[in-house]
Amino acid sequence: MTAAPSADFTPSVASLAFALAVTGSVVLLAGLWLAWQLARRVSQPLEALAGESARIGRLDFSDRPAVRSSWREIDSLAEEQARMRELLRDATGRLEDANRGLEERVALRTRALELANAELASFDYTVSHDLRAPLRAINGFCAILEKDFAARLDDVGRQHLARVRDASAQMADLIDGLLTMVRHSSRPLELRDTDLSAMAVEELEQLQRTEPARRVRVEVEPGLHARADPVLLRSVLQNLVGNAWKYTAGCELAEIVFGAGERGGERVFFVRDNGVGFDMAHAARLFEPFQRLHAEPDFQGMGIGLASVQRIVARHLGRVWAESAPGAGARFYFTLGSQA
């Protein structure tokens, strides 16, 4: 039997620790290298997808090499991104085509509007000068006849001459009304905050000064404002309040009210009176030029005022309508669209 010391067969603790440290370092380095390789294979295609997404976000749809990866999930993501790029490219192309078409239509309509405005200006000049010239000649010759041939005219001749002059004056008033309506339709809108209550008070005070003997109860709701063209809205109130004043002339105590309310979520302004009113069967004619619902001897007018009101309100994206009955007064309503 042979015996030997155990130290000859058992490594020392230092040697074992060194061996373990070397082995652990090798394993760690190998793991880090494998992790780096794995991360590189994943991160590179993901970075490429991120760059492609940024390019799509800039609406750059030019063709680029497809993103490839050994990972099925990343390939699926790349395919979905490519499909999204094609859909966005098609949608953007259609939108650009639509915009070009819209720009062309806007250009055509702008040109048509410019031509229409030029025609209106020409019409304005024609009416102001060419149509007034014959009227001035008629009035001039009538004045000569009255001055130089008065002794030769009998009562019938003087009556005929007076009718000619009255007809000439009426024609001049019609021309003025027509010009006013045309100018209201073509004048550029200048929208700003407009105090409608103050305007209504001013118009009613002016009417009261013209007929101080009339008994009229006036009610104007305070604080009514709207974003509108003040010049055109003054014309609206002049016509509506003026009509209320005119058609209450036969009332012992006239009543004229200006106010506002809500209908269907829309702000509605109104002018109400207790005058002669009218038959609603003829209401469609109210806002047509030169249309009148009352006889000329009873109430003078040209039938231009309400037609102008309708055009002004329409230019403010609103609408105007009336409610009445014979002998029960009239109520005129108007809105100003999104401007109110």
Image: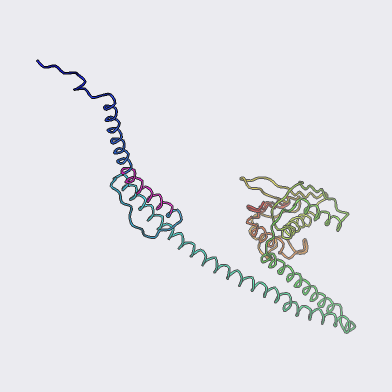
Please identify the residue farthest to the right as the structure is shown.
151
Q: Where does the magenta region start and end? A: 37-54
Which of the two residues, 150 or 248, is positioned nearer the viewer here? 248
Q: Quadrant of the N terminus?
A: top left
Q: Taken as a whole, is the magenta stretch helix, strand or loop? A: helix
Spot occupied by residue 135 in the image (x, y as percentages of width and height) = 77, 78
Where, by quadrant of the figure, is residue 321 drawn?
A: bottom right
168 lies left or right of 21 = right
Which of the two residues, 326 or 30, is positioned nearer the viewer here? 30
Where, by quadrant of the figure, is residue 125 drawn?
A: bottom right
Spot occupied by residue 39 in the image (x, y as percentages of width and height) = 34, 43
Q: How many marks?
A: 0
Name which residue lies at 79% across and 76% down.
Answer: 164
Against 174, is 87 above or below?
above
Q: Specify how the rendered protein is coloured.
A: rainbow
Spot occupied by residue 128 in the image (x, y as percentages of width and height) = 73, 75
Per the image, is 53 magenta?
Answer: yes
191 lies left or right of 62 = right
Please identify the residue farthest to the top as the structure is shown.
1
Spot occupied by residue 82 in the image (x, y as percentages of width and height) = 35, 53
Which of the two residues, 116 or 67, is positioned nearer the viewer here? 67
Name which residue lies at 76% across and 48% down.
Answer: 257
Where, by quadrant of the figure, is residue 317 drawn?
A: bottom right
